[in-house]
Image (cartoon, rainbow, N blue to C red):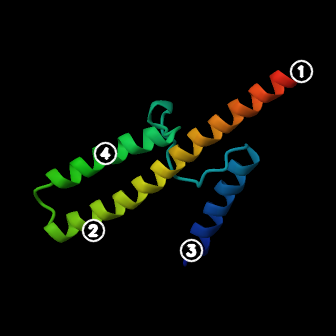
Amino acid sequence: MPYANADTNREYQREHKRLTRAGDCRTPCTTRLPGEFRLRTARDVLELLEQQVDAVRKDADASTLEKARTVGYLAGISLRAIEAGDLAARLEAVESVLKQRRENLA
C-alpha cells in the first residue's frame, strides 16, 4: 500500500526489503506471537474460538446485533476448522491403511 508521504513510503519499503533479505517475511512493524500462542491444529483453533465466543457473549457493552454478527462470523470459522480437523483425521486413516497394505505386500 503506497503512503501519501514519500518519506514514509521509502522508510517502509527499506524496512520491508531489509526484513526480506534477513529471511523474515512478515510485514514490518508487526509483532510475532510467542510459540505458546501459535495455533497448530484445528483443535487449537476451535479452543480459541470457543473462548472468543464466550467473551463476546459476556460483553456487556456490545449490542445484541453486534454479538449476533460476531458469533455468526466465529461460527463460520469454527465450521471450517471442524471440516479441516475431520479431513486431517480421514487422511491419517487412509495413510495408515496404505502403510499396512504396503507392509503386507513386503
Residue type (three-letter) at the residue carrying disc 3: Tyr
- Which of 68/84 is in front? 84
Q: Nearer the viewer, mark 4 or mark 3?
A: 4
* Residue at image point 83% right, 27% down: 102
* Residue at image point 47% right, 50% down: 81
In this view, which residue lies farthest toward the left?
60
- Find disc 1 in the rendering and name its residue: 106
Whether 89 is drawn above or below 81: the answer is: above
Q: In the drawing, what numbered circle is on residue 69?
A: 2
Which sits earlier in the primary sequence, circle 2 or circle 4?
Answer: 4
Q: Nearer the viewer, mark 1 or mark 3?
A: 1
- Find disc 3 in the rendering and name its residue: 3
Which sits earlier in the primary sequence, circle 2 or circle 1?
Answer: 2
Give the CA separation, mark 3 to mark 2: 32 Å
- Find disc 4 in the rendering and name its residue: 50
Residue type (three-letter) at the residue carrying disc 4: Glu
Which sits earlier in the primary sequence, circle 4 or circle 1?
Answer: 4
Q: Which quarter of the rendered picture does the N terminus lie within?
A: bottom right
* Residue at image point 31% right, 45% down: 50
Give the CA separation, mark 4 to mark 3: 38 Å
* Residue at image point 39% right, 61% down: 76
For mark 1, does the 10 Å Cα neighbourhood hold few (<14), some (14 to 19), or many (20 or more) residues?
A: few
